Amino acid sequence: MSLPYAEPYKIKMVEKIYRSTRAEREKWIKKAYYNLFNLKSNQVYIDLLTDSGTGAMSDKQWSEMMIGDESYAGASSYYKMKNAIKDILGFDYFLPTHQGRAAENVLFSTIIKKGNIVPGNSHFDTTKGHIEFRKAKAIDCTIDEAFDTTKNHPFKGNLDLNKLEDVLKKYPREKIPLIIVTITNNSSGGQPVSMKNLREVKLLANKYAIPVFFDSARFAENAYFIKKREKGYENHTIKEIVKEMFSHASGMTMSSKKDAIVNMGGFIAMRSEKLFKEASVYNIMFEGYITYGGMSGRDMNALAQGLDEGTEFNVLEARIKQVEYLGNKLIEAGVPIQRPIGGHAIFIDAKRFLPQIKKEEYIAQTVAVELYIVGGIRGVEIGTILADRDPVSRKNRYPDLELVRLAIPRRTYTNSHMDYVAAVCKKIFDTRNEAKHGLKILEEAPIMRHFTVKLNKIK
Ligand code: F0G
């Protein structure tokens, strides 16, 4: 008989969390205008808003924090990070930034111009925001299977090569500064991109002489899925797979708050010295001098250590098995979720959860608010509120999927917490027919409305 799986770590420090009552939560969420971003963290019992910057660092990362070099120029911490990026990812040049969107800001300031086209696989919202802010257009070329939550496809993050080639054919080369491949694809459900697809995208891009950049926040989880699901990679180490993945990219942007398991940090890495020099100007302007760019020396040290740990098979296995553990409990309870289970989060399919609610009443947000009221769980809406309005017509863009994302922070919660989350979801699902109405918007910002939107319940 094989022994059960257990985590390859033990806990050295704990943080108290408050278990509120339903009455308290009803009061708090009303005061927060039914926007979960407005809640104070101590009003939340299990915080699954994001897996970004919310992971637990290891003892080794904490010890690296103590020996950070805070020199303005040429800090040893910078060289630690440089070496980790070269050894693990294979890039010669890099610029530190304070987080992922800052990396996007610096890179896009360098290469994206008004009227440009940026194809990719469901660009993350900050990525799309930075593209549209420059009056350029992001075009989604993700495979159709990604938009059917019931379809089991091992690599739902893949780009559809026909869709991509249509875009590359339609516009002149100088209008397309880059193709962005997001690994794993957050917006389509934490779904991986296969090595085959990465290779084919690169070949196609070469044909049109367009650089490919990876938005790499969860690159290590992507490598884990390649090892588990793609033929020929079973016996490769994660680090070998990571190296091969990045060999298909000219550069990358990174939110280190995910797979490098730090609370803050990011970077751009690239092969071209010319691009490095051009981007350095913007990095100095927006972030900081090129050897710290928005990061403390101690954080660069923790990041270098985190890149190494985050690409260890055992660390990834524990992480992804926990996400699967929750996902399987929800499947058992009949709760409709995106299949297969993604890397960093469970995505509840809100349209199948509450089919009686009209799309104009923000179905996914309605489910997210219930999760909070019933169980003190904070997830996040990935639906109509996030998709925002069409920039021209200013009418709601109704996306194909209305999802509630339950993102699992790395090494932070135990499986008892996952049991609790599953029980809360089941309880709401079992009484779903009682829900008659969703929510209406009272106030919204011109862009990125999801952070500050004010809502009310429709009675
Ligand atoms: N790219 C992807 C795929 C992301 O998921 C994120 C952030 C970013 C870029 C931006 O990075 O936050 O460091 O500026 N995702 C977080 C999330 C916020 O909750 O999924 P950042």
Image: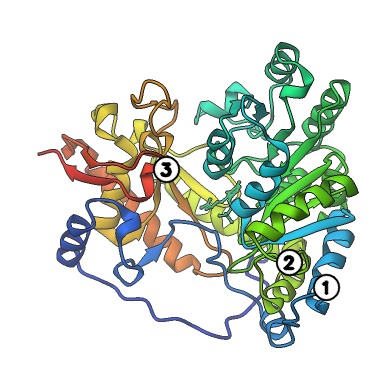
Judged from the image, the secondary structure of the residue bearing numbered disc 2 is: loop
Q: Nearer the viewer, residue 172 or 455?
A: 172
Q: CA distance from mark 2 to mark 3?
A: 29 Å
Which of the two marks, 1 or 3, is nearer to us in this view?
Answer: 3
Q: Do tag 2 and tag 1 residues touch (Cβ < 8 Å)? A: no
- Tell me where residue 10 appears, x and y as whole percent: 61, 80
- Indicate the amino acid at tag 3: Met
Q: Earlier in the sequence, mark 2 or mark 3?
A: 2
Residue under the image location 47 percent in, 43 percent down:
347
Q: Earlier in the sequence, mark 1 or mark 3?
A: 1
Q: Earlier in the sequence, mark 2 or mark 1?
A: 1
The residue singled out by tag 2 in the image is 289
Judged from the image, the secondary structure of the residue bearing numbered disc 3 is: loop
Q: Residues within 10 Å of mark 1 (few under 14, many from 20)?
A: some
- Does mark 2's beta carbon lie closer than 8 Å to ligand 1? no
The residue singled out by tag 1 in the image is 80
Image: 35 above or below 458:
below
Judged from the image, the secondary structure of the residue bearing numbered disc 1 is: helix
Residue under the image location 52 percent in, 41 percent down:
125
- Indicate the amino acid at tag 1: Lys
Q: Quadrant of the N terminus?
A: bottom right
